[in-house]
């Protein structure tokens, strides 16, 4: 074979690493908020997330996406989705590490939700497609609690750390996953426009007829869904397999052809006199399922922070090994500015998302924390899920043409980045949800305001910014028009306060100098005087 050239100046594959112990911002947040007792499990998942085997599983699960089989070879309707074995192994890793149940398995223990957020953050760096069914299984528990007898039937299975992909009788399952089916063609986020009809029976069961436009992970064992029952929009639990062992009517019409999230199956489904159990009170469907939505929104924020960390890690690795114009990229002052800017964005995302996890952890025993969780939930989900898109693109650009090539990881990460901003309510939905909370639950905004005002006097730039936040909130007549601006300023304010209080001085200084009025519009515009070397050493 002819050799025309020698391959030089290409960054090598990422060496194996522990994604937990190599992430000081994560370790500090977990310890700060009481989750350090779960270090062994976090380290275990961190090693998997940083392993070559994990990277291979991710590649295979995305390269060979799921396929729908509506019928078997004899013509029987089966409505099954087939996955590459790598997908099943990734799911097993998540459930073996308790990403689907850790909060509930350790309920009442300080830091349980924080430690579980750490697991989710790491798991999303392994492969975020499989995080969807894992997230929904975890988040379904508070909604199921509205019907204790249903929770009692499902909770022992949810608490198992085993993965069982079979559609079979519940008593035979080694472990379960749960999903959600809410949105319809005509409504989207406006679930009150749903037209699926439930014919209720006196025993709390119902027969559902209608459709769902987005049903993710359709091979889950059961789905929380919304339908119009006798009392109005009501929440129901739809199992794939009925109590007698037969298949429920759950017609998968097609799988979505998505921009990203390729390893996960998202589907359009139809119910046709499909058996279901009512969850919660009739007509209280939104109030029931919003418990699940709250936890999934927390996961979106935490997962987006994890995705930021993964993107920055790849960008730094590339810059450490690639030379241009006689110097390594990471030794070029302008590249240092870009990478440091991405690093402080990630630190701020970790700070805010784990502060929110702390509030979820304390919500049952602390009314102030419960109010903060309600107010900060939409803020964190809105902001971090949007910031990850631009950050991932910038990390991709750090790779040059290699970043745009499907053989490298950045193209997949970039396709994945926008999903969190759409899932569980778009940006406008989040902003309007905060306004709704301000109106109906004023304690939520007051808790956020209290957190912000506790940092007054710590830095004059922060003081000026917090005064501008007060000004934004003080003009209620145009709040809806300015809702995104209000949420953005609240997010920046919370991140600044958290970094000033808990972050390294160099990181906090860079954030204040660049985010509170002194920086540019894009990454890589940190002002002079910022300690780039210290920030990059930490990253």
Image (cartoon, rainbow, N blue to C red):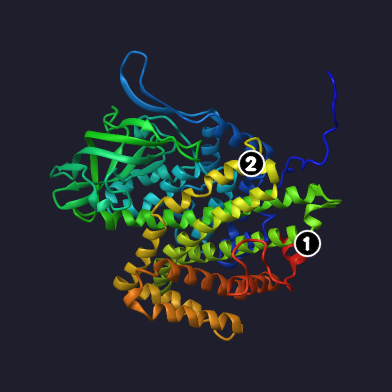
Quadrant hosting residue 21: bottom right
| Residue 452 horizontal/vertical position (percent) | 50, 78
Q: Is mark 2 on a helix, strand or loop?
A: helix
Q: Residue at x 53, y 49 (%)?
A: 417
* Relative side of 56 to 463, left or right: right
Which numbered circle lies on residue 404?
2
From the viewer's side, name the closer residue of 501 and 21: 501
From the viewer's side, name the closer residue of 492 and 56: 492
Image quarter of the C terminus: bottom right
| Residue 121 horizontal/vertical position (percent) | 56, 53
* Relative side of 536 to 361, left or right: right
Q: Earlier in the sequence, mark 2 or mark 1?
A: 1
Quadrant hosting residue 294: bottom left
Image quarter of the N terminus: top right
Crowdedness near tag 1: few (<14), some (14–19) or many (≥20) residues, C-alpha within 10 Å: few
- Decide: marks 2, 1 in contact (CB < 8 A)? no
| Residue 530 horizontal/vertical position (percent) | 72, 71
Q: Residue at x 60, y 75 (%)?
A: 501
Q: Which residue is drawn at 37% across and 79% down?
A: 475
Mark 2 and mark 1: Cα distance apart in space: 24 Å
| Residue 504 horizontal/vertical position (percent) | 68, 70
* Relative side of 132 to 462, left or right: left
Crowdedness near tag 2: few (<14), some (14–19) or many (≥20) residues, C-alpha within 10 Å: some
From the viewer's side, name the closer residue of 497 and 474: 474
Which numbered circle lies on residue 95?
none
- Residue extending furthest toward the bottom: 457
Q: Is mark 1 on a helix, strand or loop?
A: helix
Residue assigned mark 1? 333
Residue 166 sits above or below residue 499 on the image: above
Residue 462 sits above or below residue 428 on the image: below
Is residue 492 in view from this perspective? yes
From the viewer's side, name the closer residue of 201 and 189: 189
């Amino acid at each position: 074979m002819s050799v025309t050239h020698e391959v030089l100046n290409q960054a090598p594959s990422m060496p194996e690493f522990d994604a937990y112990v190599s992430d000081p911002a994560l370790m500090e947040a977990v310890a700060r908020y009481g989750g350090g007792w779960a270090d062994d499990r976090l380290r275990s998942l961190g090693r998997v997330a940083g392993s070559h085997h994990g990277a291979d599983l991710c590649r295979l699960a995305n390269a060979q996406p799921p396929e729908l089989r509506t019928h078997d070879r004899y013509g029987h309707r089966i409505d099954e989705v087939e996955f590459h074995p790598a997908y099943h192994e990734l799911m097993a890793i998540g459930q073996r590490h308790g990403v689907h149940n850790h909060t509930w398995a350790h309920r009442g223990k300080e830091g349980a939700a924080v430690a579980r957020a750490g697991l989710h953050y790491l798991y999303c760096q392994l492969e975020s497609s499989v995080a969807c069914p894992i997230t929904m299984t975890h988040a379904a528990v508070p909604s199921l609690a509205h019907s204790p007898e249903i929770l009692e039937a499902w909770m022992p299975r949810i608490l198992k750390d085993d993965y069982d992909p079979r559609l079979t009788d519940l008593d035979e399952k080694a472990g379960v996953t749960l999903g959600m089916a809410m949105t319809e063609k005509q409504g989207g986020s406006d679930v009150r426009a749903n037209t699926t009809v439930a014919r209720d029976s006196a025993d709390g069961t119902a027969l559902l007829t209608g459709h769902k436009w987005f049903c993710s992970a359709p091979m889950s064992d059961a789905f929380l869904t919304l339908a119009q029952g006798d009392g109005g929009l009501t929440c129901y639990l739809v199992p794939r397999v009925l109590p007698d062992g037969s298949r429920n009517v759950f017609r998968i019409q097609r799988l979505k052809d998505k921009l990203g999230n390729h390893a996960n199956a998202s589907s359009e489904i139809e119910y046709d006199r499909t058996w279901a159990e009512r969850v919660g009170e009739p007509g209280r469907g939104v109030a029931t399922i919003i418990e699940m939505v709250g936890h999934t929104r927390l996961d979106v924020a935490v997962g987006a922070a994890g995705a930021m960390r993964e993107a920055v890690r790849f960008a730094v690795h590339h810059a450490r090994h690639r030379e241009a114009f006689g110097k390594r990229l990471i030794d070029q002052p302008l590249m240092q500015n870009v990478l440091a800017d991405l690093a402080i964005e990630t630190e701020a995302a970790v700070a805010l998302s784990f502060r929110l996890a702390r509030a979820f952890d304390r919500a049952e025993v602390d009314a102030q924390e419960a109010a903060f969780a309600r107010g900060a939930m939409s803020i964190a989900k809105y902001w971090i899920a949007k910031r990850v898109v631009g950050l991932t693109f910038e990390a991709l650009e750090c790779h040059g043409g290699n970043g745009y090539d499907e053989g490298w990881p950045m193209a997949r990460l970039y396709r994945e980045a926008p999903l969190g901003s759409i899932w569980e309510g778009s940006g406008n939905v989040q902003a309007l949800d905060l306004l709704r909370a301000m109106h109906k639950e004023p304690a939520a905004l007051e808790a956020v305001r209290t957190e912000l005002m506790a940092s007054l006097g710590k830095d004059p730039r922060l003081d000026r910014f917090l005064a501008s936040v007060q000004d934004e909130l003080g003009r209620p007549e145009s709040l809806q028009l300015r809702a995104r601006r209000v949420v953005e300023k609240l997010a920046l304010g919370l991140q600044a306060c958290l970094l000033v209080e808990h972050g390294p001085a160099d990181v906090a200084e860079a954030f204040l100098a660049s985010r509170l009025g002194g920086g540019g519009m894009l990454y890589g515009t940190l002002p002079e005087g910022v300690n780039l070397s210290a920030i990059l050493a930490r990253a």
